[in-house]
Image: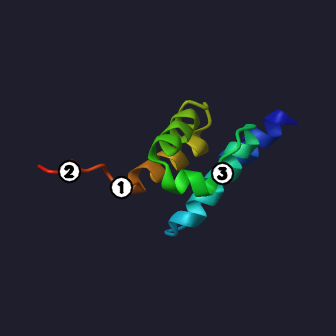
Amino acid sequence: MRTAMVTTMNSLQIDSNDPLTELVAFKWLMAGRGWWVDVPRFRRDMVYAQECAHRAAESGQELLARSSAALLAQMPRPTLQGT
């Protein structure tokens, strides 16, 4: 059963330009691995978002790693204040 779920998850295609849709898809992909993602916190807490994305990137699942990379690419880059 687990192998069938992994095969199904890896064959999914997420084709959306909507960041929230991508985040919700990421949340459910993570849930498939048993990892819960707090979407409101993910959107406001850069450290939490990076921790979730790092876990996904190292999950061994291609779709989850790609989803993580896409979300990280959309995150605002920190800027230095006062320079």
Q: Which residue is mark 1?
A: 76
Return the residue nearer the eye: 8 or 52.
52
The kind of secondary structure element at disc 1 is loop
9 horizontally vs 68: left or right? right
Residue 76 at least partly seen: yes
**Residue located at (83% from left, 34% from top):** 2
Instruction: Give percent across and percent down for residue 11.
Output: 67, 49
Q: Quadrant of residue 13?
A: bottom right
Residue type at mark 3: give it.
Lys
Under circle 2, the secondary element is loop
Q: Nearer the viewer, mark 2 or mark 1?
A: 2
Above or below: residue 6 compared with residue 19: above
Mark 1 near mark 3, Cβ–Cβ under 8 Å? no
Q: CA distance from mark 3 to mark 2?
A: 32 Å
In this rendering, does residue 13 appear at all?
Answer: no
Nearer-N-terminus badge (2/1): 1
Who comes first in sequence, dot 1 or dot 3? 3
Which amino acid type is marked by label 2?
Answer: Gln
Q: Residues within 10 Å of mark 2 (few under 14, many from 20)?
A: few
Q: CA distance from mark 1 to mark 3?
A: 19 Å
Residue ID for mark 2:
81
Q: Nearer the viewer, residue 73 or 44?
A: 44
Q: Residue at x 40, y 54 (%)?
A: 75
**Residue beneath disc 3:** 27
**Residue placed at 52% from the left, 69% from the top?**
18
Left of 10 or right of it: where is 51?
A: left
Using the image, determine if residue 49 lies above or below residue 59: below
Q: SS for tag 3?
A: helix
